[in-house]
Image (cartoon, grey):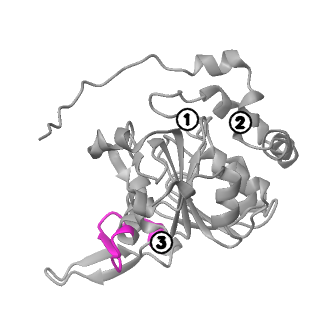
Amino acid sequence: MDSSKLMTMKEAVSKFVADGDTVYLAGFTHMIPFAAGHEIIRQGRKDLTLARATPDIIYDQMVAAGCAKRLIFSYAGNPGVGSLRCFRRAHEKGVPKPLEVEEYTHFGLSGRLFAGATNMPFLPMRTNLGSGLPAENDLIKTIKDPYTGDEVSVVPPLKPDVAVVHVQRADANGNSHIWGIIGEQKDAAFAAKKVIISAEEIVDESVIRSDPNRTLVPDFLAHSVVHEPWCAHPSYVQGYYDRDNEFYMEWDKITKEHDSTMEYIQEWVLGVEDRAQYMKKYPKSKLDALLPKPAFSAPVNFGSV
């Protein structure tokens, strides 16, 4: 494969995200691809089914901007702060448009991705039985265990039309290194029909080959590779920048009303051309405060012949 996979986020979203798609922006608290979500808003995508284990405030922004018709999720909230106000407004009041919901446990949704990634017809699990979720979600079903005869809950595979996976570093072909908190990124990439890789750094293939165990997403899954520093702000990227906790608290105030939410989106999403312009609007002192001190792991000797 050649370096033609390298493109801007604007090009990647234009080429691979269509109206009506099921979109999975990966990253469990860590490395959430905000830049991709903002570009989807800028390009006016609509009628999307947004899937995520934890919607976080990026999906709150996409819901407020009118991109979503359905949300597939497990736990919806502004982490450490409270509710996702835009999500609740859309689901409860239809503002700015009605939002359908499909809820699972964390294990249930990650199980759906694993089933999609491994091409399984369904995934059995015990955790749904006895809860109120099956009554609210027709896709959570039960079958009889062929070995014991016991009733077992099952969930269907999730195969998104497109997944966006942010990583610390990738080569031009899409071989991607991830470290720190590893969530559902690997399964999202293997389950999706199309995969957009965004990376803090684009490195030579030799860097990837020097530490093969850290390659969670291989090149044959990647449809595009985007060099996007600070892609995950206000979430964090291990070793590159910390979580902007102050913004998560500010978001709760911003979203008290739909009008104030849209004022933010107009200035910080629609009012900038790309992630680079977005970051230029932030005071340097704030960004510098998010930069972590170096904490290197011990080197590993893979040996050679």
Q: Is 111 above or below relative to 217?
A: below
Report the side of 107 relative to 41 (left or right).
left
- In reply to whether residue 37 is colored magenta, the answer given is no
- In reply to whether residue 128 is colored magenta, the answer given is yes
Element carrying mark 2: helix
Q: What residue appears at the point 43 percent right and 53 percent down from the top-left corner?
A: 185
CA distance separating discs 1 and 2: 28 Å
CA distance separating discs 2 and 3: 31 Å
Element carrying mark 3: loop
Q: What residue appears at the point 45 percent right and 72 percent down from the top-left corner?
A: 134
Of 41 and 84, nearer the camera is 41
User: Which one is earlier in the sequence, the residue at label 1 or at label 3?
Assistant: 1
Q: Which kind of residue does numbered mark 1 sit on? A: Gly
Residue 171, position as x, y percentages in the image = 45, 46
User: Which one is earlier in the sequence, the residue at label 1 or at label 2?
Assistant: 1
Q: Which kind of residue does numbered mark 3 sit on? A: Lys
Report the side of 48 relative to 54 (left or right).
right
Q: Nearer the viewer, mark 2 or mark 3?
A: 2
Report the side of 163 relative to 277 (left or right).
left
Residue 80's disc number: 1
Reading the image, the residue beneath label 3 is: 159
The part of the chain drawn in magenta is 117-134
Residue 71, position as x, y percentages in the image = 61, 64
Residue 128's disc number: none
Residue 125, position as x, y percentages in the image = 30, 68
Q: Are marks 1 and 3 in contact (CB under 8 Å)?
A: no
Residue 276's disc number: 2
CA distance separating discs 1 and 3: 30 Å
The secondary structure that dominates the magenta segment is: loop
Q: Which kind of residue does numbered mark 2 sit on? A: Ala
